[in-house]
Image (spheres, helix red, strand yellow):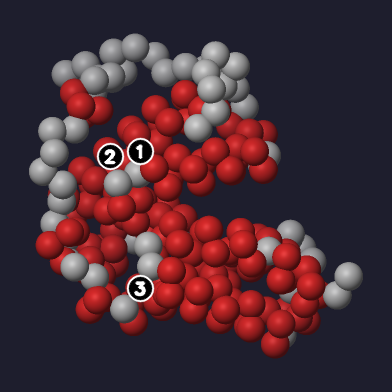
Amino acid sequence: MSFENDVAELRSYLMRFARLQLRNDAWAEDAVSETMLAAIAKPQAFSGQSQLKTWLVGILKHKVVDALRANLREVNASDLQGEHESDELDAIGFKTDGHFAQQPAQWGNPDQDLSQQQFMAVMDACVAKLPPVQGRLFLMREWLEMDADEVCKELGITSTNLYVQLHRARLRLRECLELNWFGRAASAPI
């Protein structure tokens, strides 16, 4: 197979990643197209030290950040000011001293699980189930590795709001992963 075909085969994976972050099909399509064009234009830049998918996601991360910056004016800022829901996840699971009220389920070997494609599929599904604001903030902070100040500036939110939303997102992801990955023998898949 040719390099171009190998890149083309990863398009659907790249689209899922871009859609999760950008929440806009047109922006996601543009970011993925630019990623694929950049890869095909300079195939010699792929040294083979990582998987092709990993290398392409690295390029896509930069394209997603560029798309967020370029299209920021189209984001509805009132949607990003926080969700004023009573989040039940905030009320469960912790003592007043901040420790777990009940120890989390044993997750086994996270490094080994993370490397498995099935785990990433479940993780993608769990991230997709997050409310749009939480999912976007989580992906910007954790997957795109943007620093907190940059995320706050890009989205026009306070650092307090950012950390509250990230806390809620992480709790939801933990619950989703415990139900659908770590406890999968006892429960149905997502």
Q: Earlier in the sequence, mark 2 or mark 3?
A: 3
Q: Earlier in the sequence, mark 3 or mark 1?
A: 3
Q: Position of residue 40 (x, y in %)?
A: 71, 82
Q: Amino acid at mark 1?
A: Arg
Circles 3, 1 touching at the beta carbon (< 8 Å): no
Q: Residues within 10 Å of mark 2 (few under 14, many from 20)?
A: some
Pointer 1 residue: 170
Q: Quadrant of residue 157?
A: bottom left
Pointer 2 residue: 167
Q: Amino acid at mark 3?
A: Leu
- Is residue 114 placed above or below 53 in the rendered structure? above
Q: Is residue 54 left or right of residue 20?
A: right
Label 2 residue SS: helix
Q: Position of residue 36 (x, y in %)?
A: 64, 77
Q: Residue at x 15, y 51 (%)?
A: 82
Q: Residue at x 70, y 87 (%)?
A: 41
Q: Position of residue 91 (x, y in %)?
A: 18, 23
Q: Residue at x 39, y 27 (%)?
A: 175
Numbered tag placed on residue 68 in the rendering: 3
Q: Quadrant of residue 77?
A: bottom left
Q: Position of residue 163 (x, y in %)?
A: 23, 47
- Depth check, front residue: 127 or 189: 189
